[in-house]
Image: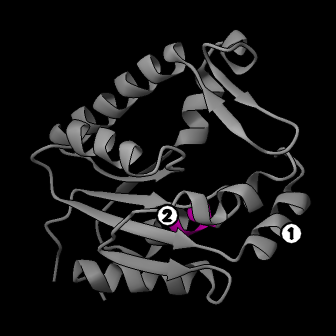
Amino acid sequence: MSSSAQVIVLNGGSSSGKSGVARCLQAVLPEAWLAIGVDTLIDVMPARLRLGSEGIGFAGDGEVSVGAEFRLLEDAWMHGVAAMVRAGARVIVDDVFLGGTESRRRWEKALDGLDVVWVGVRCDAAVAAGRELARGDRVAGMAEAQAELVHRGMSYDVEVDTANAEAVECARVIAARLGNV
């Protein structure tokens, strides 16, 4: 059975395992899906937006702040992702809803009219902090600070917990929700 879902949005804190779940979803789903993460958006932004108050900032304690210029580019990126879906691509979005329900509202606006499956990717803060340390490419404290913050006020079609299940098991749970077993 094939799902009518066109977009899967994975929301979870830093180092929660979203990217691994996205790669496993690409492997277990019968259709071709593109995986697009907010990290890619940050990587393609000018370096000055990773330093200044108008872009995205990473404090020493792991707190993340975003400015107006970042939001402008992020909105364009969200609508660009939606345009790819409207052109026929299926997309898995890997994001961190730092703004909680406001972040989701912005995605809902961009994805209006599309069949979206909302997925909460949970991970115990201590486990995520250990992953963050092992990665070495994140500001220490982000994983712990974001573990619960990104899920406040959220409702999901499906939730997975990467601290208690491997990424492929989580992908299979999501695939089952889509009707792909």
* Label placed on residue 65: none
Circle 2 residues within 10 Å: few <14, some 14–19, many ≥20: many
Q: Tell me the residue at 74%/41% (across/down).
A: 63
Most frequent secondary structure within the magenta stretch: helix
Q: Which residues are magenta?
A: 17-21
* Label placed on residue 151: 2
Q: Tell me the residue at 53%/57% (across/down).
A: 150
Which color scheme is applied?
Answer: one colour
Taking the magenta stretch, the answer to whether it contains residue 20 is yes
Give above or below for 53 relative to 146. above
Q: Tell me the residue at 64%/74% (across/down).
A: 123
Circle 1 residues within 10 Å: few <14, some 14–19, many ≥20: some
Q: Which residue is mark 1?
A: 130
Give above or below for 53 relative to 107. above
Q: Earlier in the sequence, mark 1 or mark 2?
A: 1
Give above or below for 66 relative to 107. above
Q: Tell me the residue at 88%/38% (across/down).
A: 60
Residue at the left extreme, as displayed:
113
Q: Position of residue 168 (x, y in %)?
A: 55, 81
Please, what is the three-letter code of the amino acid marked with disc 1?
Gly
Give the quadrant of residue 154: bottom left
Residue 151 placement, left or right of 17: left
Task: Give the spatial CA distance, label 1 vs label 2.
Answer: 20 Å
Please, what is the three-letter code of the amino acid marked with disc 2?
His
Taking the magenta stretch, the answer to whether it contains residue 11 is no
Residue 82 placement, left or right of 65: left
